[in-house]
Image (spheres, helix red, strand yellow):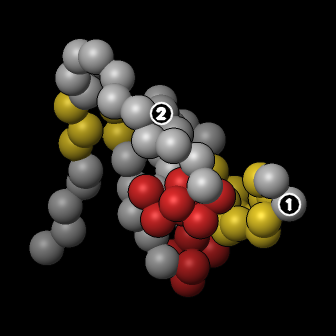
Amino acid sequence: MIGKVFALSEEGSEQMDNLIRGTCFIYDTPLIAIIDTGATHSFISVDCMRRLNIPVTEIPGRMRIETPSSG
């Protein structure tokens, strides 16, 4: 399965029509969320998981992620 993922700055997310940027709360912790309405998968950073004290577990199999490159 091939999906897509984007990494954006706060300013970049405000300039794209297919993105929704806002604050969400997980375990009463405010987090900045960027939602791509056309994305096939969602991700959370390891730093965010540590902040929320969520254990990291490995899943079987492999996932190939392609990111668009600029330049």
Circle nearer the N terminus (2, 1): 1
The amino acid type of the residue labelled 1 equals: Asp
x 21%, y 23%: residue? 62
Q: Given contact means CB atoms under 8 Å apart, are the residues at marks 2 and 1 in contact?
A: no
Q: CA distance from mark 2 to mark 1?
A: 24 Å
Give the labeled residue for mark 2.
41
Farthest bottom residue? 11
Q: How many marks?
A: 2
Q: Which disc number belongs to residue 38?
A: none
**Image point (46%, 57%), residue name:** 45
Q: Secondary structure at mark 1?
A: loop
Q: Is residue 15 visible?
A: no
Look at mark 1 in the image and give the residue it sits on: 28
Estimate how packed mark 1 is, as few (under 14), some (14 to 19) or many (20 or more) residues with alpha carbons within 10 Å: few
Q: Secondary structure at mark 2?
A: loop
Residue 25 image offset from top left, x and y in percent: 81, 58
Q: Is residue 40 left or right of residue 33?
A: left
Which of label 2 and label 1 is nearer to you?
A: 1
Q: Residue at x 21, y 31 (%)?
A: 64
Is residue 3 found left or right of 33 in the rendered image? left
Instruction: Identify which amino acid the numbered label 2 is placed on.
Output: His
